[in-house]
Image: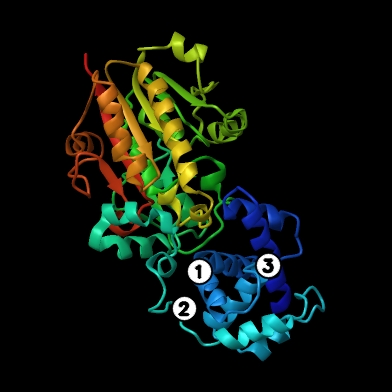
């Protein structure tokens, strides 16, 4: 593909991301499956431009608005601005890419030419930019994030806007860390142990993992180190009844299965529950690849579910990783930050409370409820925990240093009664976790 054709593909891909609801990587994979003519170099260059524009959206829009030109902040305008500001390409050279010939973008309009000239050579970050613009986050979240991080706010937000590493979890149902590393090395995939998770391997560079024997045979699963740590903190053991109450794609369920394994097989009862039949169905391929056949999948109803009533008070461990704003995963789902509005947060909080109430009924006396989110907002974390404790005196929070020492080993990286992970502090995605025990 020519440079201009790559830009046109990036414009089309950006439009699909902004009009869709799936993460950019999912939309990108779908986009290129329909365009087999795009080679690996083309895909890499187009995806790089896609993510660059997504990570700079607020700053690009600020520059477009600052020019005073009557021009919509669409994919074309943002890419033109990115070329002129971030790559410092002059307006004539940009025009040479927008010819409308051989799959190139349509020629620049007069307003677009003026835009390219007006912003050429400007700094990507300007002293007049408000903090939400300079650090790429919704302004309605500023008060909450500032209260959480204080002086560390800008460093934390800057880390959230960087590319995320690719972490793998070694599937101990099938292999050891050393054997997994050897298998990956045979496919020329270099990895290093993750700093915190004993299951984790961090990939060096950007190799294709899907075709490796290690992946196809289920020796490894792609899973952020922070997500691995949450599964460890559940403290699932052989012989227990364990429920992953919001199982989603099943990544943590598979990790729990490995924790419950004896002689290569899951010992105990492990349930993966979700309200989405589609997610529960798609999980089956991962279960088969991992060899975790003992996992039982359940589609549950948000309210008045018979299975929940029938199994009340029977579970040793219930992981409640609730749906949330996903602020901790902005490195991966770059566009997620712009999908939510304050009213969405209120709806999510109500849903989280309902889920916690349902999950709590499943915990037996002496058992544990593990509340987790991939959010950084206190409204979804500490405040929800405080609400639950006020309304459910039969549960008590366990000190995180003790739980961490029992499950992961050593002291937890950030001090506190609950666990908070973030890209800046731990090099993981952002997570919150609290472990609650039902009083016997």
Q: Which residue is mark 2?
A: 124
269 shown above or below 200: above
Give the CA separation, mark 1 to mark 3: 15 Å
**Quarter of the view holding residue 69:** bottom right
Place of residue 79 in the rendered image (x, y in percent of width and height, measured from the top left): 62, 73
The answer to whether marks 1 and 2 mark residues whose Cβ atoms lie closer than 8 Å is: yes
Q: Which residue is mark 3?
A: 11
Q: Tell me which label, 1 or 3, sits earlier in the chain.
A: 3
Which of the pair 180/267 is nearer the observer?
267
Q: Residues within 10 Å of mark 2 (few under 14, many from 20)?
A: some
Q: Tell me which label, 1 or 2, sits earlier in the chain.
A: 1
Dot 2: element: loop
Q: Residues within 10 Å of mark 3 (few under 14, many from 20)?
A: many
Give the CA separation, mark 2 to mark 3: 20 Å
Left or right relative to 392: residue 61: right
Q: Tell me which label, 2 or 3, sits earlier in the chain.
A: 3
Image quarter hosting the C terminus: top left
Please identify the residue farthest to the top as the structure is shown: 310
How many discs appear? 3
The answer to whether marks 1 and 3 mark residues whose Cβ atoms lie closer than 8 Å is: no
Decide if residue 11 is in sight here: yes
**Quarter of the view holding residue 133:** bottom left
Q: Which residue is mark 1?
A: 56
Which of the pair 170/363 is nearer the observer?
363
The answer to whether marks 2 and 3 mark residues whose Cβ atoms lie closer than 8 Å is: no
Place of residue 171 in the rendered image (x, y in percent of width and height, measured from the top left): 43, 39
Image quarter hosting the N terminus: bottom right
Give the CA separation, mark 1 to mark 2: 8 Å
Left or right relative to 302: residue 277: right
Which of the pair 105/65 is nearer the observer?
65
């Amino acid at each position: 593909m020519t440079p201009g054709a790559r830009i046109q593909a990036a414009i089309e891909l950006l439009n699909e991301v902004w009009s869709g609801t799936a993460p950019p990587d999912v939309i990108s994979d779908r986009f290129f499956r329909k365009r087999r003519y795009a080679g690996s170099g083309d895909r890499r260059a187009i995806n790089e431009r896609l993510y660059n524009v997504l990570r700079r959206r607020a700053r690009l829009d600020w520059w477009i608005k600052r020019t005073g030109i009557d021009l919509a902040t669409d994919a074309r305008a943002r890419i033109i601005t990115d070329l002129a500001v971030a790559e410092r390409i002059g307006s004539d050279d940009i025009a040479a890419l927008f010819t409308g010939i051989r799959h190139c973008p349509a020629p620049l309009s007069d307003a677009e030419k003026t835009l390219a000239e007006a912003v050429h050579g400007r700094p990507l970050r300007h002293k007049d930019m408000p903090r939400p613009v300079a650090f790429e986050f919704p302004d309605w979240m500023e008060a909450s994030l500032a209260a959480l991080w204080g002086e560390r706010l800008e460093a934390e937000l800057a880390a959230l806007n960087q590319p995320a590493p690719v972490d793998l979890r070694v599937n101990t149902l099938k292999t050891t860390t050393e054997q997994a590393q050897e298998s990956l090395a045979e496919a020329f995939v270099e990895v290093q142990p993750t700093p915190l998770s004993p299951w984790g391997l961090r990939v060096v560079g950007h190799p294709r993992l899907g075709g490796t024997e290690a992946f196809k045979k289920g020796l490894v699963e792609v899973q952020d180190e922070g997500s691995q740590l949450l599964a460890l903190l559940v403290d699932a053991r052989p012989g227990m009844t364990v429920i992953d109450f919001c199982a989603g794609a099943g990544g943590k369920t598979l990790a729990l299965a490995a924790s419950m394994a004896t002689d290569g097989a899951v010992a105990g009862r492990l349930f993966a529950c979700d309200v989405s039949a589609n997610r529960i169905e798609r999980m089956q391929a991962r279960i088969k690849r991992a060899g975790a056949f003992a996992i039982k999948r359940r589609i549950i109803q948000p309210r008045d579910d018979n299975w929940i009533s029938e199994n009340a008070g029977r579970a040793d461990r219930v992981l409640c990783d609730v749906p949330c704003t996903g602020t901790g995963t902005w490195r991966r789902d770059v566009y997620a930050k712009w999908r939510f509005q304050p009213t969405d947060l209120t709806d999510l909080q109500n849903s989280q409370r309902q889920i916690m109430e349902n999950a709590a009924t499943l915990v037996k006396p002496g058992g544990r409820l593990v509340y987790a989110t991939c959010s950084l907002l206190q409204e979804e974390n500490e405040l929800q925990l405080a609400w639950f404790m006020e309304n459910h005196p039969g549960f008590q929070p366990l000190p995180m240093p003790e739980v961490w020492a029992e499950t992961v080993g050593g002291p937890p990286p950030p001090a506190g009664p609950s666990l908070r992970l973030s890209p800046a502090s731990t090099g993981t995605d952002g997570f919150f976790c609290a472990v609650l025990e039902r009083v016997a």
